[in-house]
Amino acid sequence: MVEGSPAEPHARRRVLIVGAGVAGLTAAFRLQQAGVPFEVWEASSRAGGMVGSHDEDGFTTEAGPVGVLEDDTGAVPLARELGVPVVPADPDATRRWVVRDGHLKAFPSSPLGVFNGDHLPPWRAASALLEPWRRVGREDDETVHAFLSRRFGRGVADAFSEVALVGITAGDPRSTSVDAMFPTWRTLERSHGSLLRGLIAQRKQAGKRPRKLHAFGPGRMEALVEGLHAHVRHGVHLSRPVTSLRRDGGDWVARDAQQRDGVFSHVLLATGAQVSASLLRSVDPTLAELLASVPYAPMRVVGLGYRREDVPHALDGYGFLVPEQPRVRSLGVLFSSSLFPNQAPRGHVHLRVLMGGVRDPDAVTLSGEDALAVATRDLQRTLGIHARPVHVHQVTWSDAIPQYGLGHHSWAQRVKQHAAALPGLALCGGAYGGGVGVNDAVRSADEAVTPWLERLPEA
Ligand SMILES: Cc1cc2nc3c(=O)[nH]c(=O)nc-3n(C[C@H](O)[C@H](O)[C@H](O)COP(=O)(O)OP(=O)(O)OC[C@H]3O[C@@H](n4cnc5c(N)ncnc54)[C@H](O)[C@@H]3O)c2cc1C
């Protein structure tokens, strides 16, 4: 069945958005505001993609993101536009820890604080403090580990490069591009002749306060995608995966799993790069190959509810990160109900254990029982919890977070050039170098559809 033949004028100016994650829904919302006809085809039976909040027994487990940092262009202003309540995390839950040799060590909040004895031997710290006098790098791109090694010495790179990444991309610092992942580090190095001087100057800047974490509704991420979905619901088709795309004259023809075709003038792929690659294989094999070359880290979320009296730790902070070590397998633990108290019922706490990443891809193939055993053993070793959890909810993501390898910016440039040669095609999401978080997904969707907003209605 073909919906909208190319002869119909409406078919010629319809946009198909593939994927109803936060990026696809944001794009749909923008098209709707501009009066541009669109459809969203979503493979799953719910909208939101990785943004989803599971409520059970009074506990809320975030399947993907737990929060977003407020900025001028991301999810927080979008939520305000949608009329979705924005809820800040508890301002007292800011302390973080890093696990060293199986024990929690407080992570200092100031750049100089990291050189205290908890994280580095004194001679390593002394050598790191020479950073302001080291030469400014002229490398085209380098890995996060190589950058920190060059600026602060090998000891700092070994102690902190994984910590810097594990909570963002769960990536490998020895293959992640510093230019793509931490572009401000390079900018500060160049503008101040030193990263340390740059970071200190940045903190001193008038009005420069640390950005705060926020969620939505009563303190859950799903409220954002529910708000978006409510605005564009009429155009969203759930349980309708796109199985192929082809060009027909100047149009795009999308086919779904039931062999139904739709004809569109424009297509926005708001899917991960691997899915986008498979959909574009017959249209542009070179572009498909480029897209398929981006690796993704898998992730497993183990949400655990405990009675408060069973947890000896004060949980007076954000949570802790775990650089690779033999005693603790998890990547980190978030004190979710310390950040958003509504995520556990009275007298209880909720913890979110993250596993997997580039260093431990097998964590997503463990049985639920084995993963629970790993998570509870890690919590016993780090927080001293011996009791069984009263609530468990697990989620696995096979292609969770795109990895920005060396030269990622030039990869993104090549993708852009290839996509531009296919009229009416756009791509958005975290793979394209703008960042891997929810704010970045929102921004990438805005950027992808902006050129269509004015031109399309008159087309
Ligand atoms: C465990 C975890 C923790 C995270 N923590 C944070 C955090 O704290 N803060 C933060 O900012 N970010 C975080 N992120 C990242 C954040 O979740 C993503 O940046 C964001 O959700 C990406 O949204 P998206 O719309 O680009 O992609 P997705 O959410 O992946 O949406 C893509 C959609 O496309 C659909 N789809 C796939 N194939 C097809 C097809 N063939 N046809 C139709 N539809 C298809 C999928 O079902 C999905 O709904 C986290 C991610 C994970 C996994």
Image (cartoon, rainbow, N blue to C red):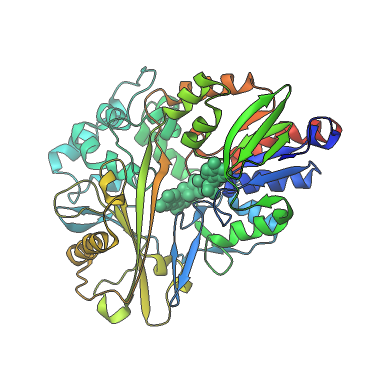
Q: Where's residue 275, x and y in %?
A: 50, 37
Quarter of image, res 223: bottom right
Q: Which residue: 38% across, 33% down?
A: 295
Quarter of image, res 315: bottom left
Q: Where's residue 457, x and y in %?
A: 83, 36
Is there any visible trace of residue 153 in the rendered image? yes
Residue 309 vs residue 232, the one in the foreground: 232
Q: Which residue: 41% across, 27% down?
A: 293
Q: Where's residue 304, x and y in %?
A: 33, 68
Residue 142 vs residue 289, the one in the foreground: 289
Residue 46 vs residue 89, the one in the foreground: 46
Q: Where's residue 18, x and y in %?
A: 61, 41
Residue 279 vs residue 426, the one in the foreground: 279
Is there any visible trace of residue 92 in the rendered image? no
Judge left or right: residue 421 versus residue 57. Answer: right
The vertical placement of 399 against 185, above or below, is below
Q: Quadrant of the C terminus?
A: top right
Quarter of image, res 245: top right
Q: Quadrant of the N terminus?
A: top right
Judge left or right: residue 171 versus residue 122. Answer: right
